[in-house]
Image (spheres, rainbow, N blue to C red):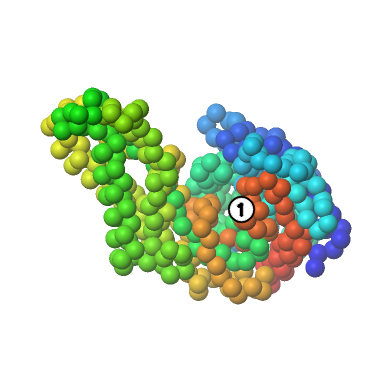
Amino acid sequence: MPTKKALNHCIKILKDLVSFQVLGGQSNLEIMDYIISILNDAGIEFHLIPNTDLTKTSLLCRIGHPTDGGVILSGHTDVVPVAGQNWTTKPFVLTKKEDKLYGRGSCDMKGFLACCLASIEVFKKSDLKRPVYFAFSYDEEIGCLAGEELAAAVHHKYKEKPAFAIIGEPSMMHPVVGQKGICVLETTVNGSAGHSSRIKDEVSAIHVSARLIQWLEKKMDDYASGNIKDNRFNPPHSSIHVGKIQGGIAPNVIADKCTFYWDVRVIPGHDVRDIIKEFDVYSQSVESELQQKFPGFSIETREDHPPVPPLGTRNDSPVVDLIKKIIGNHHLQTVAYAAEAGQFSNEGFETIICGPGDIAQAHRADEFVAIEQLEQCLQMLENLAEEFSK
Ligand SMILES: [Zn+2]
């Protein structure tokens, strides 16, 4: 187990990190300045990967010599809002109660960032034969918006090639090899208004939406009975869900507009773009059919944000061997939440999710991380330093 001093150092950093109220979508420059000050004190060079208007930035740094085969430790600096939640502690003041630390982001996922930053001395003291990288992002909570660019930047900023990525999302320090990809979409149907008695002469946007939604549900049933399956997930196939629909003004008025919001969750090996393309083809056929009746008829679908790719690390991947050595846990899991892991995997890094805290505590009031989880994470990083010194 890590020393009391190392643990207290980690908790002090976590306290500071939690005090920065960086919600997804907001500037993270202040929290990055704080992280940079820690890197500066340790004499570690870093790269920034800012957004176009320079209000947010990701950060990359390396500890150890430039050699192939290193490991990237990755986490995000933003958190979800606290508005409307019934907190019994101050969400942006890390509060210790018994063996738990409460605060927004304590679990998702500033706890992991604090463990990484608190382990700098351990990494520096070790005779690392392969380097350790930190890759910290922004805007993860609103659709993993910076992860793709950050993962790609590893290739641009460094000549050597890291082999592994560990994404420290809350997993109770269990190794997670799979995560479904997700895409959130909004479809608007523009029909023609009129008295409901004229339904045969007009085009109801609600009726057409119902037709499109049925098509989506049928598509999911096809996946359920089809061949593209990954039994590590529940359900083992890609799924489609319509979660919100709005349109119409009264029972006796034909609706000229209806919008529905849906998501697609794909298993590894299933490209969400293919599903969207198929839906577009069907939409176009409905469009040309109904434009005969009402020339102004249209169906528009837009993505809420670019699709987040799935993670499908093989159970025999070398990163699984590494993680088994440094956490001693052989029980591989998959998770239902989206994360930046698929984006790192797509860049050719063998990727796994493993971090302190329970996802069940994330995003809710009185979010906490158990101190024992931080200890386990610090121990994992110490073991990593030892393993990489061989
Ligand atoms: Zn997270």
Residue drawn at x 31%, y 31% is 251
* 385 sits to left or right of 153: right
Quadrant the N terminus occupies: bottom right
Could you tell me if residue 132 is visible in this image?
no
Quarter of the image for residue 322 reads bottom right
Quarter of the image for residue 30 reads top right
Residue drawn at x 30%, y 65% is 226
Could you tell me if residue 368 is visible in this image?
yes
Quadrant the C terminus occupies: bottom right
Per the image, label 1 sits on a secondary structure element best described as: strand
Residue drawn at x 19%, y 32% is 199
Q: Position of residue 341 (x, y in %)?
A: 53, 55
Quarter of the image for residue 66 reads bottom right
Q: Which residue is mark 1?
A: 74
Q: Position of residue 201 (x, y in %)?
A: 15, 29
Q: Position of residue 372 (x, y in %)?
A: 77, 62
Furthest toward the top, the residue is 194
Q: Is residue 292 above or below residue 237?
A: above
